[in-house]
Amino acid sequence: MNIEEFKTKYAAFKDTDKIQIQCDHHNHIPFGEIITIGKQPAKRNILKSGGKEFICRQCFMKYNNPVNKIGEKRQDDSIIEVFCPCQEHNGEPSRQMKKSCYYGSMETPYLQICGSCVQKGREISDEQKERIRLSLTGIKRSDEFKEKLSVYMKNNPEGIARAKSNLIPGSGGGWNEGLNLSEETKQKMSESHMGKKFSEEHCQKISEGRKKMLEETGGFTPEHRMKLSRATIRQYQNGFDPKTHHIRGVHHSTKIPSGQGVFRSSYEKKAFMILDNDESVVSYEIEKITIKYFNPIKKIDSLYVIDILVKHKDGTSKLIEVKPQSWLLDPVIQAKIEAGKIKAAEIGLPFEVWTEMNLFGHVYNKKNMKLFMDKILSEVDKNRRIKISSEKSKRYYHTHIANDKITLFCSFCNEEHTPLRLTHDKNIARNGRYICEREGGHIAGSRPKPHLQKNNPHVADGKKECVNCLQILEFKLFSPDNTKRDGLCGRCKECRSKKAKEKYNKKTK
């Protein structure tokens, strides 16, 4: 069946429908067998055969499979020697490759043009060069490959000249070391490194190189430090989004009067850590002082809480407000800070605003900041997991354990008890049989204390001694108490009544 006959016959069928079709291969067994197959796969099958016939998969794999062809096969990983037939080939014309990679005629000698000769005379477009560059970027080369490349470059003057032409003057060692860089070159270098992710080994080498350079030059000059400071401020203002660092959690410290305090951002967490490590700080309180300020946006009077009140060993104190550098231009934040300064002047305390410069230093290090954030997140997640685990345990107890009870008859008390199944199983595992609280003389779960148990010497007369008035009275003058060994309260009814009246009179006064 060719493709035209197929379309005509199965025009009413959808691509997802199953159809009945006959294999056209002359060696199909049994001849004339009807095959059930989807319409779309059957159509693709006919198109693969040039649109002339439908060959089932069984016949194709049996008669047309290249692996089963008679003679030399290509699907073989044996190594063969292949010759390049190009007359302009440079170097040794023969090379070794797997037979499965060879696509020439399966006759000896094996002839196949090499990759170098194929590329001769071809012009590579800039787009193709960029794709090649991206495909090679980040590939780790072996030491053997690097050694071969080094030997080749040393023995090839053209390669050395080509490599030098690609270098940026003044950006490396050797012939261009010490050369002044132009502003255009600096900009190119900055753009090329923008967003790059370096490995830990590479970062370590850069760090060691900078330390060595600073040792040789005597450290940063005042001018260089000023440039670093200004650049860091610009980074904090432009590229450092404080909204991504709003992590809430609980900070535990012995310098906080309550033992713990809530931090509402990673900035506040860092400020608490700095105060903990400061030996001059005795204690600090979080959100202690509330002040009133005028909100310039809403045009109303609002309340504002200063972040930290710090007390030093020398008896002095100060107020600290933690805010991102980029937020200091906000009119509401400015109004809060002005109100905080006025309040601090009224109570005679200094007022400080701590930004990223005070918390993380004058050099912005994205890697260290990420490590700090990961540490906080791990602590917050740990506390959250502990809380969730505790809530799950309580929920599981009230849902499953607290409602799973067992009723049994106690031969000691001559009555029925309804303990938890968990308590019942533990009791039997500990004692060999179930012993109720009255028989054991102790609360379930605690260890019995035989040396503290006292026997009632008046039990034969049906009496016991009151622990309050010390009178020996009959059992009927004591209220029942199932937690006691004898099932009666330790105090008599009259003593309990007096105690309850005294407690009531104290509440009503």
Image: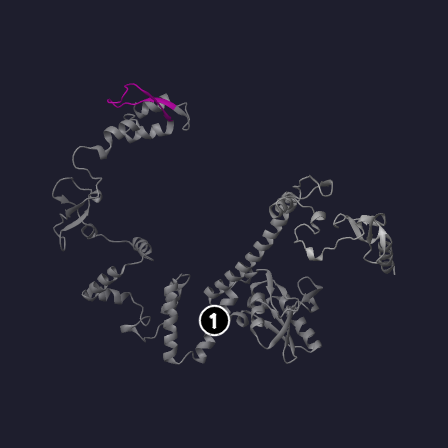
Describe residue 473's horizontal placement relative to residue 372 as left or right: right
Magenta part of the chain: 19-38
Q: Residue at x 50, y 72 (%)?
A: 361
Position of residue 484 relative to residue 363, above or below, is above
- Is 37 colored magenta in this rendering? yes
Please state, as top left, top right, bottom left or bottom right, where the C terminus lies in the image.
Answer: bottom right
Q: Is residue 293 visible?
A: yes
Residue that extends furthest to the top in the rendered view of this protein: 32
x and y percent of residue 86 in the render?
14, 49
Image quadrant where residue 417 sits: top right
Colour scheme of the rendered structure: one colour
Describe residue 332's horizontal placement relative to residue 104 as left or right: right
**Would you call the spot at circle 1 few (<14 residues within 10 Å), some (14-19), or many (20 or more)?**
some
- Element carrying mark 1: loop
Describe residue 465's horizontal placement relative to residue 418 as left or right: right
- Is 53 colored magenta in this rendering? no
Q: Is residue 184 visible?
A: no
Closest to the observer: 101 or 377? Answer: 377
The amino acid pointed to by label 1 is Val
Please state, as top left, top right, bottom left or bottom right, where the N terminus lies in the image.
Answer: top left
Closest to the observer: 43 or 188? Answer: 43
Give the residue pinned by disc 1.
363
